[in-house]
């Protein structure tokens, strides 16, 4: 009977490990350019964070666009230091950038405002925002034009709130 319990436990562990997908791309250090596929992450854990604002600027001649995501504390106030933990993944088919923010149960912007702010974008064709109240997480998805390269990095809040910056480089 003792051996049956050990065998059952072993089979459970082996089958549970098989359910974890193999990571196709290695994490890229923050600030490196992602092309095709890749992941980048940064930030810190905390008590909770708020999506405060999203701004877009572009340089048409250089084919570069910047999206700045302001991250505040749980109460929606300016956050000093690094932003909350984020995980950004550039996917290939279809090409899209997905940014997951942990411990971010609230946003000062809704889907309509984000679409409005990204209207006329050089690289973003569509965007979506979703909040997961169970996980206390926020997900931003940007559908991108083909062959868009991406750089995602964090900016610590010293004088203003912390930020996650996304540079989109069109070819």
Image: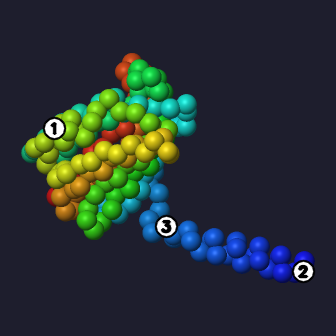
Q: Is residue 152 visible?
A: no
Left or right placement of residue 46 versus residue 148 in this view: right
Left or right placement of residue 4 versus residue 125 in this view: right
> Label 1 to label 3, Cα distance in Å?
34 Å
Mark 3 is surrounded, within 10 Å at the Cα level, by few (under 14), some (14 to 19) or many (20 or more) other residues, namely: few
Residue topped by disc 3: 23
- Residue 148 or 144: which is nearer the viewer? 144
> Label 1 to label 2, Cα distance in Å?
65 Å
Mark 1 is surrounded, within 10 Å at the Cα level, by few (under 14), some (14 to 19) or many (20 or more) other residues, namely: few
- Relative to 147, residue 155 above or below: above
- Residue 148 or 135: which is nearer the viewer? 135
Residue topped by disc 2: 1
Q: Is residue 112 visible?
A: yes
Residue 116 image label: 1
Query: Which residue is rendered at x = 83% and y = 76% of the image?
Result: 5
Q: Judging from the image, what secondary structure is the residue with disc 2 in?
A: loop
């Amino acid at each position: 009977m003792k051996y049956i319990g050990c065998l059952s436990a072993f089979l459970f562990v082996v089958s549970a490990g098989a359910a974890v997908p193999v990571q196709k791309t290695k994490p890229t250090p923050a600030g490196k350019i992602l092309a095709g596929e890749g992941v980048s992450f940064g930030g810190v854990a905390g008590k909770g964070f708020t999506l405060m604002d999203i701004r877009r600027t572009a340089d048409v001649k250089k084919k570069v666009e910047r999206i700045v995501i302001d991250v505040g504390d749980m109460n929606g106030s300016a956050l000093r230091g690094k932003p909350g933990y984020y995980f950004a993944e550039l996917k290939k088919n279809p090409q899209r950038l997905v940014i997951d923010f942990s411990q971010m149960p609230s946003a000062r912007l809704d889907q309509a405002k984000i679409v409005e702010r990204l209207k006329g974008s050089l690289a973003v064709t569509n965007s979506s925002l979703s909040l997961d109240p169970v996980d206390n997480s926020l997900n931003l998805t940007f559908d991108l034009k083909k062959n868009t390269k991406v750089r995602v990095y964090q900016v610590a809040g010293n004088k203003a709130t912390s930020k996650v910056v996304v540079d989109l480089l069109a070819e």
